[in-house]
Amino acid sequence: MEVRRGACSAYVSLPEQPEGRGVLVIHEALGLTADIRSISDRFAKAGYVALAPRLFGGLGCLVRTFSGEKRRQDLDGWRAYLRQEHAVERAGIIGFCMGGGFALAHASTPGSDFKAVSVNYGAVPENLKGVCPVVGSYGERDRLLLAHAERLEKELTELHIPHDVEIYAGAGHSFLNQHSGWYVHLERRLGAGYNEQAAEDAWERIFAFFGEHV
């Protein structure tokens, strides 16, 4: 279902039997696609209240998305919405590509109460001190972000933060996302796109990690 908060909207997927756990799902630069809705539904089937904000829902939301402080306020607002409207006391946050970097950066901000963050082929912010437990998934063929995976593993180890970072051999960028239309052809040209074997292994790790920490 679609919900609104101020000028922005989000897709919410509800579990049959809520357990007081939830997750914010942060989309890629492609926006709130059918794939992101499907991912939210997948979390709902696992017992989480899943909320995917529409970051590009109008000029006001677009401007806020690329302003770090305003984006933080919006994501904190959606986190509060989960608590107030759906009694979500424990929450995780997951993001893909652009959204993966946003999710990891947000989970690293002072005062964030997320219990775990899943970053999938997302950029690593400069400062990870204070971040919650991290599960990260990257593709070996993702030349742009492979170095981020290696730095993420190194810095989380040095900071003694619980983590599980995996680099999948043979997988490229966006290997967890099942896109459709013209973008699929572009992904193939770039050596990116859905990789079922890597994706299913990553989902198993993500749900196990969230099950332990959220």
Image: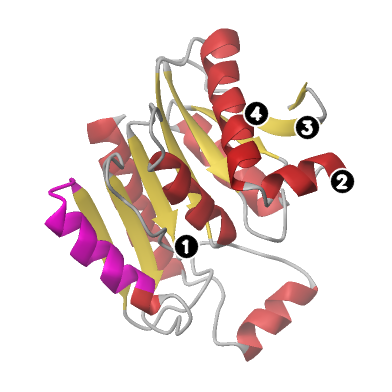
Q: Which residue is tagged 3?
A: 8
Badge 2 or badge 4: first in the primary sequence:
4
Measured in 3D between alpha carbons, the distance from the residue under mark 2 to the one under mark 4, in whole angstroms, is 22 Å
Give the alpha-carbon distance from disc 1 to disc 3, as whole Å.
23 Å
Residue at image location 38% in from the left, 43% down from the top: 108
Q: Is residue 138 above or below residue 172?
A: above
Image point (28%, 69%), residue name: 151
Q: Is residue 203 left or right of residue 14?
A: left
Residue underneath mark 4: 12
Question: Would you say the magenta stretch is mainly helix, strand or loop?
Answer: helix
CA distance separating discs 4 and 1: 23 Å
Residue 176 makes an appearance in the image: yes
Q: Is residue 149 magenta?
A: yes
Marks 3 and 2 sit apart, C-alpha to C-alpha, by 10 Å
Q: Quadrant of residue 152?
A: bottom left
Write the residue at 37% across / 71% down. Answer: 148
Give percent across and percent down for residue 149.
Answer: 33, 69
First in residue order: circle 2 vs circle 1: 2
The magenta segment: 148-162
**What is the spatial separation of the Cα atoms under label 2 and label 1, in whole angstroms?**
24 Å
